[in-house]
Image (cartoon, rainbow, N blue to C red):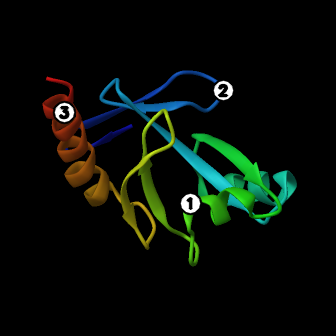
Amino acid sequence: MYFSGLTFTSLGYGDVVINGRVRLIGVLYEDTKANGLRWYQEKGGHWTNLLDPRGRMAIDYGVRGVPETFFITRDRHILYHLPRPVTPEILDTWVAKLLAAMRVVRE
């Protein structure tokens, strides 16, 4: 899959990696695996999804309503939060900005 300069690569079993550095993961918030699978069959999508049937992860990250978009580091720090669904435009803008910011912090 390709969106405006971002290369999405499927790594098998639903993993999607953006520009070789960012993994796209969805969360099924207060839902079931069966409902999630049905939604993906109808709407499409092949990225990894985590189940959050009791909403615990949502509480931990301060979700106020769904859908929301979070950019989170491997060690679970929120880099950026948008209270709306992810779009190709959001990915185009924020993946590059956040990766650049992380490079500056590491140097």
Q: Secondary structure at mark 1?
A: helix
Left/right placement of residue 31 relative to residue 27 reads: right
Q: Nearer the viewer, residue 53 or 43?
A: 53
**First-in-chain label (2 vs 3):** 2
Point 19% across, 33% down: residue: 105
Q: Amino acid at mark 1?
A: Tyr
As measured in the structure, the alpha-carbon distance from the residue carrying label 1 to the one carrying label 2 is 26 Å
Residue 68 against residue 18 in the figure, above or below: below
Pick the quarter of the image with the C terminus. top left
As measured in the structure, the alpha-carbon distance from the residue carrying label 1 to the one carrying label 3 is 23 Å
Left/right placement of residue 28 relative to residue 95 reads: right
Residue 64 against residue 37 in the figure, above or below: below
Check disc 2 and report the residue beneath it: 13
Image coords of residue 33 (percent x, y): 83, 51
Q: Which of the 4 image quarters holds residue 12?
A: top right
Image coords of residue 61 (percent x, y): 56, 60
Q: Which mark is residue 61?
A: 1
Q: Amino acid at mark 2?
A: Tyr
- Give the mark toward the camera: 2 or 3: 3
Q: Which of the 4 image quarters holds residue 20?
A: top left
* Label 3 CA crowd tier, 10 Å (few <14, some 14–19, many 20+): few
Q: Amino acid at mark 3?
A: Val
Image coords of residue 84 (percent x, y): 43, 72
Check disc 3 and report the residue beneath it: 105
Question: Are discs 1 and 2 less than 8 Å apart at CB?
Answer: no
The tally of labels here is 3
As measured in the structure, the alpha-carbon distance from the residue carrying label 2 to the one carrying label 3 is 32 Å
Image coords of residue 14 (percent x, y): 61, 32
Q: Which mark is residue 33?
A: none
